[in-house]
Amino acid sequence: MKNYITVLILLLSLTACRRDFDETIFGETPDARLTKTLDSLQNRLAGEPGGWTGFLTTGTGLRAGFYFKFTQNNRVSMVSDVVTGGETVKESSYRLKALQQPCLIFDTYSYLHILADPNGDVNGGTDGAGLQSDFEFAYDPSANNRDSIVLTGRMHNSRLVLRPGTRTDGEAFDAGGLSNAQVFDSLPKRYLNYFKRFTLGGNTYELVVNRRKKSLKVAWMEGAVYKEAMSYYMTTPSGNVQLISPVDANGIKISVFTDMRWDNAAVSLSFAINGERVTPVGFTRPLQVDLTAPRRWWQTSKDEDTYWVSATGFRVNGVDDAYGVSRLAGYTALMYGAEWGTVRGTTTDCFGYIRNRTQLFAPAVVSPPSFGNDGRVMFTRVLGASGDPATFSFFGTNPGQAAINTFFPAVTKLADAQGYIAVQIYDTYDLVDPVNATSWVSWER
């Protein structure tokens, strides 16, 4: 018994030593280390003289650019390039807190909260989830480095990457936010033609921009070989457009567009790449037509049993939503779905619009559309014998005669005999008229 008691005392002593050893193995207790991490993060956020550029990817795949200026007294000022009016500086509060791990919390309503708002009317997302974005972010010190801070949303796992801004960014922010850089966002609207080309270093490049997804494609020829590269981008207060993944094109590295200038008289935008000024010019045809893109667009809807949506409708001869469908009562978005049903014994797609994010009005379109060897897709609408819009074979809720009459020109445009070519940027597709590229509709999921 005496030996047993002696061994027990020895084991308890060793256990106590182990616990003490574990707590001080790094010279500090876990609580002390966590406090030190939070203090270090706050000093880094508030101490950056040029502020921070931020690039947020939501759970739905939307990309948003931000610029932040943090202070030591837990205030943060920000602008955002994805929200209407986002060039206006908003100030809110933030906290750094230990919630099982170090966390950065934006705790009063800001541009971040607009993207995360669960009310679909606020941001165009789904009721109950919004755009699946966050305003509380976990910080993992081991996943960060000198050049960036990577944060992960605590609810939707949205990803926020912060990079140090330049002193010029800070000065421009103090002088007025993002107004210069947002000129680039409107590039697709400022030119009559969909395709834009510029010359750099003796080479010709094609530039296609998707403002809603904050993405772009650069295409060029290397001899007789067609090349293309895509990147997401963000705008900064100093008027720059920063590519998240630099493009290496014909031996020229393109990572940032600087010094944006819009010429009202010439109706053209110019900017600098690597110190060389370029001016995109509108073109009626792409460098090379993607022959299989239309079928990929349609097949994606069929295989995934989903549909494509377009918030903005057709742009025709410089006019957004040329047929006014967005003014229809309860309009949410245009939609196109492959193999939606059967009408009069014919398998049909549907092309229509979503109302109040729940109801659908979608006339029938012959399925599948015709795919030409020249990269065009042609659509045929399904109408009654009279050709009157009132005799549409439709899916979903009948919106009434007035709405049908309003929507009819958009259906007619889709069925234009010249068809469309398709341009893909990541997971979005634009259907563009193949004759002069002055009409197009943008599709996303």
Image (cartoon, grey):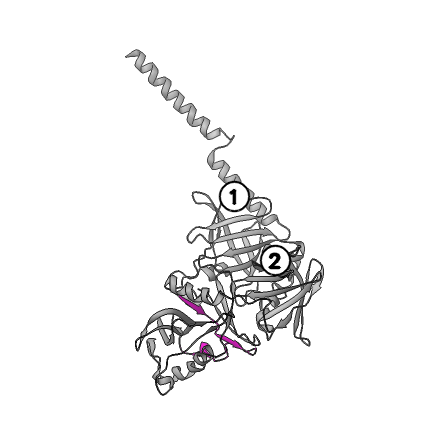
Q: What residue type is labelled 2?
A: Gln
Q: Residues within 10 Å of mark 2 (few under 14, many from 20)?
A: many
Examine the rendered structure and indicate whether residue 302 appears above or below residue 384: above
Q: Residues within 10 Å of mark 1 (few under 14, many from 20)?
A: few
> Where does the image place residue 338, in percent across and percent down from the top left?
38, 68
Q: Residue furthest top?
A: 2
Label 2: which residue?
242
Q: Which residue is drawn at 47% across and 35% down?
A: 30
Q: Which amino acid does label 1 sit on?
A: Ala
How far is mark 2 from mark 1, CA to CA? 22 Å
> Where does the image place residue 348, in percent across and percent down from the top left?
36, 73
**Between 44 and 255, which is closer to the camera in this rendering?**
255
**Between 309 and 15, which is closer to the camera in this rendering?**
309
- Asked if the residue at tag 1 contacts the one at tag 2, i.e. Cβ–Cβ closer than 8 Å, the answer is no
Q: In this view, does 423 lie to the left or right of 165?
A: left
Looking at the rendered image, the quarter that the C terminus falls into is bottom left
- Secondary structure under the numbered disc 1 in the rendered image: helix
**Between 212 and 86, which is closer to the camera in this rendering?**
212
Looking at the rendered image, the quarter that the N terminus falls into is top left
- Secondary structure under the numbered disc 2 in the rendered image: strand
Q: Which residue is drawn at 57% across and 70% down?
A: 188
Does the magenta run of residues contain 309?
A: yes
Query: Could you tell me if residue 155 is visible in this image?
Result: yes
Q: Residue at x 51, y 55 (%)?
A: 93
Residue 251 found in image quarter: bottom right
Q: Residue at x 36, y 69 (%)?
A: 339
> Where does the image place residue 305, in percent across and percent down from the top left?
36, 63
Q: What residue span does the magenta drawing correspond to?
A: 307-329
Q: Is residue 233 left or right of residue 155?
A: right
Q: Residue furthest bottom?
A: 386
User: Residue 143 has which mark?
Assistant: 1
